Image (cartoon, rainbow, N blue to C red):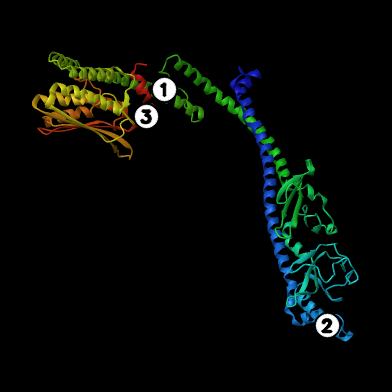
Amino acid sequence: MISRLLEKIKLKNSRLSTKLIITYILLTVIPMGLLGALAYYEYTKSIEEKVGEYIPKLLKQANNNIENSLDELERLPELIYSSSDVMSVLRDSSYKNQSELHRDQFVVESFLTNTYLDNSSEILGAFLLSKNRSFISTRIPYEGFNIENQSLPYGEEHALGDKIQLILPKQASLKFEGNPPYILLMKQVTDFDNRKSLGTLFLAVKLSFIKDVLADLEEEKNGTMWVMDENGQVIFHTDSSKIGSVFTDINDYPLVNGSFQTGTGQEKTLISVNKSARHKWILVHSIPLKHLTMGTDMVRNVTVLAFLALVIITSLISCFLAWSVTKPIKKLGHLMQEVKEGNLSVSIPIHSNDEVGVLAQSFDSMLEEIRELIQKNYSIEIRQKNAELYALQSQINPHFMYNTLQTISMAVEDGESEMVVEMVTLLGRMLRYSLSNKDRLVPISQEVDHIQDYLKIQKFRFEERLTYTIQIELDSGSYFTPKFILQPLVENSIKYGLEKRKGLSIQISVKEILNKQGKKDILFTIRDNGPGINEEKLAELNSKLKSDPMGKRESGFGILNVHARVMMMFGDQYELRVHSSIEKGTEIRIQIPAILKSEVTNYSGIQEDGDGK
């Protein structure tokens, strides 16, 4: 994309130093500017989101505190039942002489003063109406509360039962000196013994308890808070003049728990709301967004100035670096051109310790490794081809073919047609397996089937002189093995075993084992009860196995061939081991990695080379 851009602005053929400067601007200055703008946007957005998440949590806690305060206040009217004198007065008839009326009034109002006013500074006054009587105790002067005033539900029966009714600000004509905001708690006093209403108790409670709860949230001078009911009646407001008014915009709020934005441009406002569970009061916090991001605007201005200064300084530095870099790179480019033309013996004259010097040293090391790899791969290729030749020779052994055809011929002469058909079938299957050189790695089940066919043919030839068993202790169809690693070893056992023995028994087993690293390997074991190998020949054989597996040797197949192919495919940690004792027989073990079908591609280089591609 950058090269196309350079081509469009006609700089494709310009000097490298010019391209480096242009590239610096494209890759550093512009992205840094965009990154700064994006960072500022994301930072301010993050502030808005964090505040939008944080404030509703505070509002919820504040609402819970308000609810708890209301619960405590709503328990206050119950205290009237603790005074037997007051209850006795309320049960009496309202028609008494003047002295008894004054006495009752003194008893009740003294109780109201001592119980409510003296114990709670938030209560402005207590009003008890009973049977056309009024008992009043207030902290400060008041007006607008009397029996004749019908703005309050003064009747004897209010169907409240045990419930307490809240009368919100400005719903009553009662006013106290100084016009402090308040709410009225109205509680019906009931004679539970006679199940009659004795009167109604009103407690005027200052809204200071709400202000105290919201004190921590009011620290932000630019924020506004208020409490209202579901109909928008404002119960408390940071602007006291709005207490008692109706907030009509509540119907436009998209939610009652959470945060949302209103307005556009500089007039955007973040509004957070929370609705209480019991009283359904809605607590609202409103603050203009510009006040939330005021600190980031100053950071933005400082960042812009710092960015411009940084661009000027780094541009000068980039010009110097562009010149210092292009000179050795140009020299290195000439040397690379020589290598491209086939000269791998070039010498790198750059010896600095900077990045270009490290590049030159790395290039020099790469050339050295290439020269070594060419030599090594040439040697490996020759050895690999020799191994393939040995394997091919072991696949089609002319002695085996001659002896098998001779056995078939004798069976034809003896008229054993079934034996002939079976031997021809087995031989055809072996030849088809031998000539299919597409893969070097085949399922273990195919290799086992092949050696079974081979042993069956040899059984026809040697009859009772040869016995064999094959034991498979794994899922032979799931694991893969190099092709033709069993037949050369079994051939050796038969060849040398039947030379000195009248009978030969061969045991073949295949099983899973764990190697030293704790990974799965496959172990092939071929045992026979042949004459064995003496210590001198066994030592010579083991010496050959430990030496260069692909060195020149007289035999092109057999133990050495299998050992060489296993090492070439899987490395020195996998090998063929021979254990033998005179007159006790020989045991050969071949250990290879457990290769699943999905892992065969790891040996694709080996596979492809096998079919000459």
- Estimate the spatial distance between the alpha carbons at disc 3 and disc 1, rounded to whole Å: 37 Å
Crowd band around label 3 with a 10 angstrom C-alpha radius: few (<14), some (14–19), many (20+)? few
* Residue displayed at 77% across by 82% down: 85
Crowd band around label 1 with a 10 angstrom C-alpha radius: few (<14), some (14–19), many (20+)? some
Residue 376 position (above or below residue 134):
above
Q: Which residue is mark 3?
A: 597
Q: Is residue 268 left or right of residue 580?
A: right
Label 2 is placed on what type of residue?
Answer: Asp
Mark positioned earlier in the residue sequence (2 or 3): 2
Mark positioned earlier in the residue sequence (2 or 1): 2
* Residue displayed at 25% across by 17% down: 428
Q: In this orientation, which residue lies closer to the viewer: 39 or 423?
A: 423
Mark 3: secondary structure: helix
Q: In this orientation, which residue lies closer to the viewer: 219 or 121?
A: 121
Q: Which residue is mark 2?
A: 104
Residue 184 position (above or below residue 228):
below
Hey, which residue is sitting farthest front in the picture? 194
Numbered tag placed on residue 582 in the rendering: none
Q: Quadrant of residue 538?
A: top left
Q: Report whether residue 567 is seen.
A: no
Disc 2 to disc 1: CB gap under 8 Å: no
Residue 251 at what x, y percent from top left? 79, 49
- Estimate the spatial distance between the alpha carbons at disc 2 and disc 3, rounded to whole Å: 104 Å
* Residue displayed at 61% across by 24% down: 2
Front label number (3 vs 1): 3
Q: Which residue is mark 1?
A: 367
Label 1 is placed on what type of residue?
Answer: Leu
Q: Is residue 532 left or right of residue 548?
A: left
Label 3 is placed on what type of residue?
Answer: Lys
